[in-house]
Amino acid sequence: MQTGLNHPTGVGCVAPGSRVRCVSRCAPLFSILIGVAIGAALTSRCLGQTPPLPDPLSPRVLVVYTANDPGSTQVANYYAIERAVPPTNLCPLTLPDPRSDWLVYADYLNGVKAPLKDCLSAAGAQNILYIVFAWIGPSRVQAPDGSFYALDSLIADVWDQYTPDDFNADLGDPQPYYADAQSQGNVYQAYQSFAAYRDQPGALTVYSVWRLDGSTPDVAQGLVDKAIVASGQGFSGNAWIDRRYGPLDDFPDASYGEGDWDLHRAAQFLSEAGYSAIEDDNPEEFGTPPAPLTCPDALFYSGWYSYGTYNDVFSWNTGAIGFHLDSLSVAWSAGAIERGITVTAGAVSEPFLEGLPRPDGLFRNLLEGANVGDAFLRNTRWLKWMIVNFGDPLYRPFPNGAPGFNPPPPVDSFALSAREVPGGNPVTGTIRLAAPAPDGGATFTLATNTPFIVDVPNTVTVPAGAIEAEFTISPSTVEEYSEVIIYAIGPVMLANTIAVGPTAGPSNERPGHFSSMHPVDRHRSDLPADAGSGVLLRRTTTPTDPSLVGVATTTSDFPSPLKSATATLAVGSPTGNPSPDWNVPSPLPGNTTTSAAFPPATTRSGLPSSLTAPAAIDRAPASRKVIAP
């Protein structure tokens, strides 16, 4: 794909199909940052170039740049002009080392958080919805305990309203704009724009935070060019969805199954919108047989799993949106940006599977007409955590919604009032039909794959003319965590998964979580010699001996063919602070080159040749899904 960002003529072009949009390279000459009005700048653009129409949400964007970095200043100028962002919405920072990829905590507080809050106050904290970092070097902040968090995710809750702590180590409730989904049950919340959420009474003042990044300022500006070209242009391409666990007929939507079910629904939605959706369920990643060896005309992508690398098998069409599910997926995102993707997101450190953007709801929201700023935030569970978004948040690939998705038609679904419960706690199941039940009603036979753990009625009937019926699900008291599929077989076949754990004792565990991870149980442990990179890993922290300062013992479950192992994790404390060196992904976007950072797809160091889903895993209680070695 030709971006033209390095054309010596001073004008770059991107060409989606037969349409061509030339983008001025003279934009950096207009010094918004010293007070020149954007309106004047737009009238003085290169001859022959038509200014883009401003997005109605442009006044609700804050552009943040490092004043002591010319490249950052250039990209901020460029974006503000291209998107008609008011000059008052430009926010300068001064950092000790503007091209460093991380900040110590004190530099974050004094050099980013405090001045950015001043900028928000000046621009109107309630007015701003989206914050755009313009080619800013740091993407991570080191907490006092040695852990790393995504700078962008910290700023999303810069007013500390979602959580008063600077770092969301305890992973409590989801952030307020998050829309949970039950993928196997086909249960999705109605889309609400971020502006509509923020403008309602009592809404928390959180932000959708993005960055324009790449190996050079021109690459970062290319993200803007491609987004503007692709918006509403009727682009075309394929959807590439890379699952790994085979057929899902009897596969639970729990643990790692959640990832595959999300991906499966994403492929379904994109196919229903008219795109060619290639859904591969082999354990091998795209580029490795028997999975497809190349992914041409890629417009949408999500999949897993390789750790901290970019598999260079995609040909990205203008406007492409894609992201990888792995524990250091920021490295995949960096490679995709260099190869021409328009929007992506990645984790800067272990996010747990639940902490990654969910592809099904994300692509569904885009098809419903959301811009990417809304779609990614609405489908990312936690703030002050690990995710960095790359691209232009105002990019809206389907301004009027894709065919069949504005609004989406009613569907048959099976909802659970709770999907993770301690044993002995009843749950309500709801069968909902796409159309009213016929005369005589619609009767469903209910069954589970483990009736001795979860009891359900023999049948449930949706009355004639009605669209839904409820029934009670009764989990037994259990000693070990179990995942149970509940089937509803009638005019259509529906299913959903409930996770049942041991009854919580007198402790301060949060509802819905049977045991919490240690807040810094994210540091790399010593793995078995045959684990290699890219192995999916689950951990559960067990109580520690108070005399063992800074040490916690965990049990780790490795899906077949690997075996369980016990690991020792360093836990941050004044007397036992682990070195973060293992966890410093280097290089990162903005200070790297493609050849150094992004190994070819054939580089699969230590990855087992076959990593299939076992028929049954003796899962530890309520461990979060750690997805990196």
Image (spheres, helix red, strand yellow):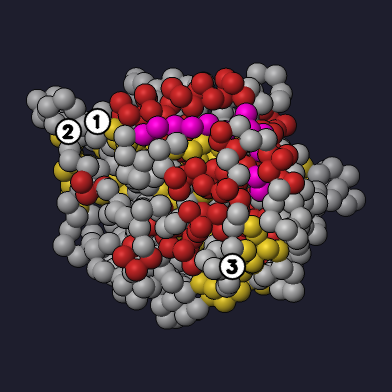
- Three-letter amino acid code at disc 1? Asp
Quarter the N terminus occupies: bottom right
Please report whichever mark, 2 or 3, sits nearer to the chain's N-terminal start: 3
Q: Which residue is mark 1?
A: 145
Q: Which residues are magenta?
A: 81-95
Residue lying at 44% horizontally and 45% vertically, measured from the top left:
70
Residue lying at 44% horizontally and 32% vertically, measured from the top left:
93
Q: Are marks 1 and 2 in contact (CB under 8 Å)?
A: yes
Residue 289 on image: x %, y %: 42, 81
Q: Is residue 230 above or below residue 73?
A: below
- Of 139 and 366, the residue lying toward us: 139
On screen, residue 590 versus residue 56, left or right, reads left
- Three-letter amino acid code at disc 3? Thr
On screen, residue 407 versus residue 449, left or right, reads right
Q: Is residue 294 above or below residue 385?
A: below
When asked about the image quadrant of residue 90, the answer is top right
- Three-letter amino acid code at disc 2? Asn
When asked about the image quadrant of residue 25, the answer is bottom right
When asked about the image quadrant of residue 99, the answer is top left
Label 2 Cα neighbours within 10 Å, binned few <14 / some 14-19 / many ≥20: some
- The CA distance from mark 3 to mark 1 is 50 Å
Whether residue 70 appears in this view of the structure is yes
Please report whichever mark, 3 or 1, sits nearer to the chain's N-terminal start: 3
Residue 325 on image: x %, y %: 45, 56
Q: Please tell me the numbered disc located at residue 577.
A: 2
Residue lying at 51% horizontally and 54% vertically, measured from the top left:
220
- Is residue 93 shown in magenta? yes
Q: Please tell me the numbered disc located at residue 9.
A: 3
